[in-house]
Image (cartoon, helix red, strand yellow):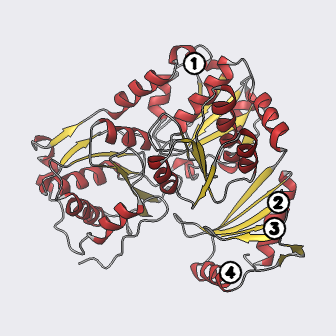
Amino acid sequence: MSNYKIKFGTDGWRAIIARDFTVENVSRVGAGIANWLKEEVDPKVVIGFDTRFGGILFAESLSIVLLKRGIKVFLDKQFVTTPMVSYAVKSLKCDLGVIFTASHNPPSYNGFKIKASYGGPATDDIVNEIVGLIPNEIDMPANEDYNNLKSHPDYKTVNLETMYFKNLNRRFSLDKLMKYQRDYVFDAMNGSIQEFIQKLFPEMKMVRVDPDPTFKGTSPEPIEKNLEPLKLALKRGDFELGLAVDGDADRIGLMDRNGNVIDAHHIMLILIWYLNKYKGQTGKVVTGFSSTQKIKSLCKKLGLDLKIVKIGFKHSAAVMLKEDVLVAGEEAGGIATKGYIPERDGLWNILIILEMLIENNITIEEVLKEIEDEVGKFDYVRSDLHIERSKIDEVIDGLKNELPTEIGGRKIAYTETLDGFKFYFNDDEWLMIRASGTEPLLRVYAESTDKTKAGKLVELGIEHFDLL
């Protein structure tokens, strides 16, 4: 009997490999899924994994557990991206999809993301029902189960990459984009997009496109501190733009020609601006609680409705299922757009941006200037603090009990508490405190009119709440 409590957070269940993320615990989740699906007629699940340690072992273990319980399984035996699995769920008419990935977490982690039949993150209701059906005891897959897997009548291997490519080809003029591929450099961050992106753009300059489950010791999150190889490539060559995705390719990262990061806040603004102003598309904008206030300003100018949701793309996906949504995105770089599945897709968004630049003969700097003229200049800083869980709880519990009226001598105009604590000093500046839902750390966020001022706000928050 296992005493380990499996907990799904902001985006799936994540745990350290071989300590808590084990074949036994994966098998337990598999049994929970099978229990949840037992009333379905001809239930089917598609499974994939990224480049992290143990991916194929965990995927085959889950397959065995499901097959033994009457669930048909589609498995891609090569590493794939999360969007490939999400698209396959809908394309193959499966009841659920599973991708083994810990996304941007450190290399010691693996994770278990569940995708629903509509091709996006499973809702809290679905996940909570599955978790409630996870047993404490499980019969572990035996050696012969692995040996006999390929001969099981309900087991089928599939090529998710091919299905995904066909969908890209339907939406984008890939031949046209390929003509300009030498103008850009792509950082795969040693993640699961590495082989596919080289096939898609064989003449594009690439960095970190070799399989490495350690990610060269860097968390595969496309933020400034992790994109030094991309920055170096941009400085050494004559490129228009640097492109990046995270380890499982559902988040986007960008750098301008000089190696300056274009953060996810600006990327969301770019997508809203292009799809509405250039393409004439409409719909609601959905964004997470930690996103810039400038999205609100731009939506007001463009006449678009805005909905702010809790952090975790499952909350945005839930809105997309019910309403006409133009763009749904988060500060961490996970963004979805109209006309696609309700799912984040880093490459999809990159192709939209390349389409914008090439078809309109415009630079990313010119687009950003157009947006700045509408909403003003801003910048953003986030600090991820690895501190003791007891200290995190102390800070969060203290804020729940009493909200401050000032921080470091700066008077707070008002506070919002939808998901964390967001303190507004004025229309242009805010500071936010939130415990991560995927890692044991505390995040401190700030926005101001430039990066230096935003950084000082973060420092002010760290000092005020005694977080060092």
Question: Mark 3 falls on what kind of element?
Answer: helix
Q: Mark 4 or mark 3: which comes first in sequence?
A: 4
Q: How many angstroms separate mark 1 from mark 2 (CA)?
A: 38 Å
Disc marking residue 177:
1
Three-letter amino acid code of the residue under disc 1:
Leu
Three-letter amino acid code of the residue under disc 3:
Glu
Q: Mark 3 or mark 1: which comes first in sequence?
A: 1
Report the number of numbered marks: 4
Residue annotated with mark 4: 399
* Residue in the image at 75% along x and 37% along y: 259
The part of the image, by quadrant, that contains residue 274 is: top right
Residue annotated with mark 2: 429
Q: How many angstroms separate mark 1 from mark 4 (CA)?
A: 50 Å
* Residue in the image at 10% along x and 44% along y: 152
Question: Mark 1 falls on what kind of element?
Answer: helix
Residue annotated with mark 3: 459
Other-residue count near label 1 (Cα within 10 Å), few / some / many at <14 / 14–19 / ≥20: some
Q: How many angstroms separate mark 4 from mark 3 (CA)?
A: 18 Å
- Quadrant position of the N terminus in the picture: bottom left
Three-letter amino acid code of the residue under disc 2:
Glu
Residue 235, position as x, y percentages in the image: 76, 31
Q: Is residue 353 above or below residue 293?
A: above
Of tags 2 and 3, the one toward the viewer is 2
Front position in the image: 33 or 23: 33
Question: Mark 2 falls on what kind of element?
Answer: loop
Residue 64, position as x, y percentages in the image: 18, 53
Residue 380, position as x, y percentages in the image: 76, 53
19 left or right of 255 in image: left
Of tags 4 and 3, the one toward the viewer is 4
